[in-house]
Amino acid sequence: MRQNIEPMESFYRTHQYLLANIHAPVRRQLMDEIDWSHRLIGIKGSRGVGKTTFLLQFAGEHFGNNPECLYINFNNLYFSHHTLLEFAVEFCRRGGKTLLIDQTFKYENWSAELRQCYDACPDLQIIFSASSVMRLIDENNDIKDIVKVYNLRGFSFREYINLKTKLELPSYSLGEILENQDTIADTILSKVNPMEYFGKYLEHGYYPFMLEKRIFSENLLKTMNMMMEVDILFIKQIELKYLSKIRKLLYLIMQTAPAQANISQLATEIQTSRATIMNYIKYLKDARLLNTLYGEGDDYPKKPKVVYAHNTNLMHVVLHDGVNRDDERKTFLYNTLHSQHKVNVGKHGSDFCLDGNIQIKYDNQSQYRHNTKTWFAVDTLSVDHKHEVPLWLLGFLY
């Protein structure tokens, strides 16, 4: 005879099972960056960076098995016949305080109902995950005045080292690194040689699913296709027939990135308009497959100065003829810098301008340039000159 389990109890059982079986060997820095006093918090991130694990880590760290916190996933068919509002009201009636919601985009009218829950349940906190392509503030009038949005990134080089070595090396701000690079580098080097891990990180260290016992490259290719099929086509409501054009565009750009994109040539090769190419590049950027670099004051829909792969792991999967070392290092540099700073095209011959005033250039020669306006990221273990900083050390920004 089948046991009759009420829906709420079923969700609690799933919650407890997931907590008991979570595999999260690295505590993400974002956990300490979030102001958890907010009642509505959105955790954005690209597919594969660990949003579900992050929600469960929060539950375990802040609540343990306390039933005041509950994880739910909109993959559950229960929500095809019941509303989020009625579930939240019942959860609060039973003493619930914090509701963790995953796969938010799969629930129709999710933002409107989040607002209803916020207003109807004044003692309820909701923390929800969201795809990186979702514009939680710009395109959602229902919640833009009440939601606090944070971005979950892939593993930093620091997090990767901590994962591999079981160390607990801290992060540093860019100001701290530029001012005290010698002291900071010596402290790290006394515990680990970062260069033993740097190449492996660039190849497969950005996405947490590298911990899974599956072929990383195949897993990443699957994830990339899901980004295009779900995070771009489904969420942006683009017809499936255009998927092949988006895939081809990504492939063509990745062959030369980082480089200035020839929009007219791409439009000809893909047989679409320049405006459509610009839209597709924007979607690929939002999905965290590409990065675009603009001059200060410029942005979409203008043409970017340079287009990058979002991270180096993507380069290693797509570029079958091998990855150019300098391109790889510049891509790493852009990826790690823009995690904490606004990055534009550099001035005075530099590659990047940070926050309008700090100039940084990747230097593969380890030759000190007498340009006091520019910092040189040098691909060596340590440096000897004031305006140089080890490239790997910039992987400690988060």
Image (cartoon, helix red, strand yellow):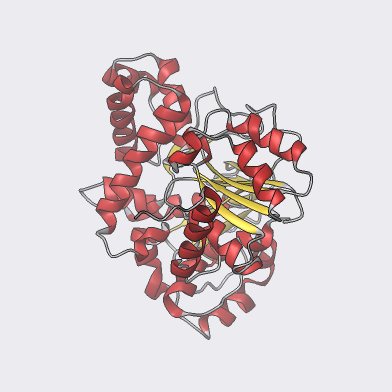
For residue 297, above or below residue 50: above
247 vs 319, nearest the viewer: 247
Quadrant in which the N terminus is drawn: bottom left
Residue drawn at x 45%, y 54% is 332
For residue 352, above or below residue 165: above
Residue drawn at x 44%, y 50% is 331
129 vs 322, nearest the viewer: 129
Residue drawn at x 47%, y 45% is 46
Q: Is residue 65 left or right of residue 327?
A: right
Q: Is residue 367 visible?
A: no
353 vs 31, nearest the viewer: 31
* Residue 232 percent coordinates (x, y): 42, 31
391 vs 108, nearest the viewer: 108
* Residue 8 percent coordinates (x, y): 55, 51
For residue 238, above or below residue 110: above
* Residue 246 percent coordinates (x, y): 34, 28
